[in-house]
Amino acid sequence: MRYKETGQVHLDFHGAVNTTVEYIAGKYGADALHEIFFATGRDVYKDIREHLQKGDTSELLNYWKYFFDREKGDYEIKEENGKIVLHVRKCPAVEHVKKLGLKVSPEFCSQTTYVNKGITDGTPYEIETVKTGEYSCTQALRRRKS
């Protein structure tokens, strides 16, 4: 897996991201922020996208598992009705931002939606991301409808 980090986990990164998200959304607007997230998914996670283009979901699943395990997230991944669904019961990023005493940006979770759109751009897949609570969401990976 290309996106595997080693060494100490630095969850404070999520606080820096939250602050940056607030700044960009406030100064340039949500659309600009969404473009940045989309480009991140498309370009930074290019290897995952290239695997999806070939119909191989393994890199994305390994990525999800690796980072949620590494950050001690409460999640499960299941196959449901022809989809692979990541159920995040307690997001470690949101939890840590709150632990730092920061207000979670209203745009903080949009990074997941738009990075996922970038990752699946030009692939036979799409990811539907639904926020289900303050700390929870589902991300459903499925083949696009023809």
Image (cartoon, helix red, strand yellow):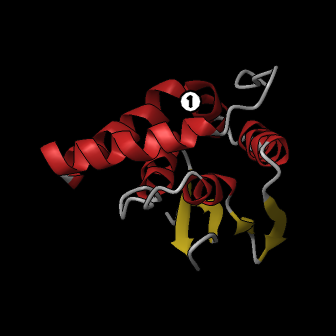
The residue lying at 56 percent from left, 30 percent from top is 45
**Mark 1 Cα-neighbour bin, 10 Å: few <14, some 14–19, many ≥20:** some
In the rendered structure, which amino acid carries the disc numbered 1? Tyr
The residue lying at 21 percent from left, 44 percent from top is 32
The residue lying at 28 percent from left, 42 percent from top is 35
Task: Name the side, left or right, on which 35 lies relative to 105.
Answer: left
Q: Quadrant of the N terminus?
A: top right
Residue 12, x across and y down, in percent: 60, 38
Tell me: residue 1, above or below residue 103: above
Task: Name the side, left or right, on which 65 lies relative to 24.
Answer: right
Image quadrant in which you'd find residue 9: top right
Asked whether residue 11 appears in the rendered view, the answer is yes
Q: Quick one: which residue is furthest to the front in this view?
A: 101
Residue 114, x across and y down, in percent: 42, 51
Pointer 1 residue: 45
Task: Name the side, left or right, on which 25 lies relative to 19.
Answer: left
Tell me: residue 41, above or below residue 79: above
Task: Name the side, left or right, on which 11 lies relative to 7.
Answer: left
Choose between 63 and 16: the one closer to the eye: 16
Image quadrant in which you'd find residue 107: bottom left
Tell me: residue 33, above or below residue 105: above
Asked whether residue 118 appears in the rendered view, the answer is no
Q: How many marks?
A: 1
Element under disc 1: loop
The residue lying at 85 percent from left, 46 percent from top is 69
Residue 129, x across and y down, in percent: 54, 66
Residue 55, x across and y down, in percent: 69, 42
